[in-house]
Image (spheres, helix red, strand yellow):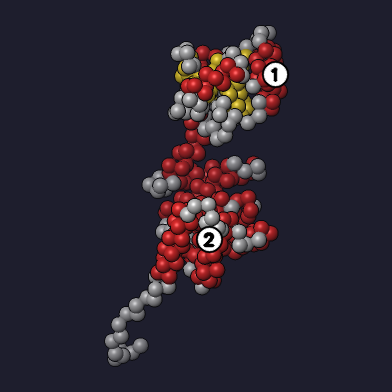
């Protein structure tokens, strides 16, 4: 403490603090999955069930990536009973979104949260995204949270959410266009352009006999497009 | 398909057109399908690519997109039967406005 204290070397972070413990376990797991996939019929249960307790132990010790692993393997591992899934996911996402929202692996949390929408419900899901939006200092994580929250709100049955969803997406287009999420927003815009209330885009069609037509020729008539396959 | 055939016949003398857009069939499968299901209406064949389905952001098959006389999308869905009523309604509107 004092100026006179002897020099002590900087502390070397332990493996676990560096996330090394997770990397090691995950490497072991990945090897097991590869073997399981390559095995013939009698491979037995997916390895995620056998690895579950070890990832769960890491998670309990506060390892964020282990929490994300639990979230993304919960369905496949079938270790958590269906009736407990909501509660488990809720507490994992609560920790992940509040404590790890600046991490470079956080994109997986954002996508898994969207995939859990049905289990968690709209209100909880949007609440978790809003935590990220309020707290993260990483533009990519901010844009991802804005994208998923905006997407969910714009498609929500609660119409009062639509305007807020629009504002979230507009914020990505205005301030975060350099992040990778702008591509997703553009896809969503293309989707919106062909929903009810919008003008149908024109297109050229060709029958298998070579007859060419385009949609605009049928202006003035009611047109039903039927996208189908015989397969 | 019988439903679509009935739909086309029901509105035969009205300003209504059904346009099929096929996705995912080989030319052989497609030709066989047209015959088996007696597809008499206009049907676009896209081959392996699906530019028209992509343009309309089709997320599952079948998908129906109902377009009014002004070119505006008025309904979307995966059930052909569910299109019967909105089609009849649009045709009635069109008839009323042309009087």
Residue A49 position by quadrant: bottom right
- Residue A127 location, quadrant: bottom right
Q: Is residue A165 left or right of residue B11?
A: left
Q: Residue at x 43, y 70 (%)?
A: A21
Chain of the residue under the numbered disc 2 shown in the image: A
Mark 1 surroundings within 10 Å by alpha-carbon count, few (fewer than 14), some (14 through 19), many (20 or more): some
Q: Which chain contains the residue that carries disc 1?
A: B
Give the SS element for disc 2.
helix
Q: In the displayed structure, would residue A162 be above or below residue A59?
A: above
Whether marks 2 and 1 lie on the same chain = no
Q: Local crowd at mark 2 within 10 Å, few (<14), some, or many (≥20)?
A: many
Find residue B49 and report its horizontal and vertical position in percent: 44, 28
Q: CA distance from mark 2 to mark 1?
A: 54 Å
Q: Nearer the viewer, residue A210 or A168?
A: A210
Question: Is residue A6 or residue A114 the one in the foreground?
Answer: A114
> Looking at the rendering, in which quadrant would you find the N terminus of chain B?
top right
Secondary structure beneath disc 1? helix
Q: Which quadrant would the C terminus of chain B be assigned to in this image?
A: top right
Confirm whether residue B79 shows in the render. yes
Residue at image location 70% in from the left, 20% down from the top: B89
Is residue B51 something one can see in this rendering? no
The residue shown at (56%, 29%) is A231
Q: Position of residue A230 (x, y in %)?
A: 57, 26
Q: Nearer the viewer, residue A153 or B75?
A: B75
| Residue A139 in the figure: left or right of residue A225 | left
Question: Residue A104 location, x and y as percent?
Answer: 41, 59
Does A200 sit above or below residue A69? above
**Label 2 close to label 1 by CB (< 8 Å):** no
Q: Which mark is residue A48?
A: 2
The vertical placement of B82 against A11, above or below, is above
The residue that mark 1 highlights is: B88
Which residue appears at 42% of the width and 73% of the height? A16
């Amino acid at each position: 403490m004092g100026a006179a204290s002897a020099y002590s070397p900087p502390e070397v972070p332990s493996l676990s603090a560096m996330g090394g413990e997770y990397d090691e376990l995950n490497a072991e797991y990945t090897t097991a999955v590869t073997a399981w996939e390559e095995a013939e019929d009698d491979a037995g249960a997916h390895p995620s069930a056998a690895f579950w307790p070890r990832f769960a132990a890491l998670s309990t010790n506060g390892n964020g990536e282990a929490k994300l692993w639990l979230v993304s393997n919960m369905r496949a591992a079938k270790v958590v009973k269906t009736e407990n899934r909501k509660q488990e996911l809720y507490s994992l996402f609560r920790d992940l979104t509040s404590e790890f929202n600046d991490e470079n692996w956080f994109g997986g949390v954002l996508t898994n949260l969207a995939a859990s929408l049905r289990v968690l419900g709209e209100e909880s899901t949007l609440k978790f995204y809003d935590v990220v939006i309020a707290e993260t200092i990483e533009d990519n994580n901010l844009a991802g949270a804005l994208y998923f929250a905006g997407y969910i709100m714009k498609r929500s049955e609660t119409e009062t959410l639509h305007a807020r969803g629009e504002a979230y997406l507009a914020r990505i287009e205005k301030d975060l266009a350099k992040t990778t999420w702008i591509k997703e927003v553009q896809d969503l815009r293309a989707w919106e352009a062909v929903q009810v209330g919008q003008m149908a885009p024109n297109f050229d069609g060709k029958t298998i006999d070579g007859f060419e037509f385009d949609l605009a020729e049928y202006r003035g008539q009611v047109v039903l497009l039927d996208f189908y396959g015989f397969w | 398909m019988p439903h679509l055939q009935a739909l086309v016949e029901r509105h035969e003398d009205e300003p209504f057109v059904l346009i099929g857009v096929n996705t995912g069939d080989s030319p052989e499968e497609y030709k066989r399908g047209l015959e088996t299901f007696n597809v008499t209406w206009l049907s676009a064949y896209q081959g392996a690519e699906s530019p028209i389905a992509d343009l309309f952001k089709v997320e599952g098959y079948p998908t129906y997109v109902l377009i009014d006389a002004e070119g505006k999308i008025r309904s979307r869905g995966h059930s052909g039967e569910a299109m019967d009523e909105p089609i009849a309604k649009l045709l009635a509107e069109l008839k009323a406005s042309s009087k």
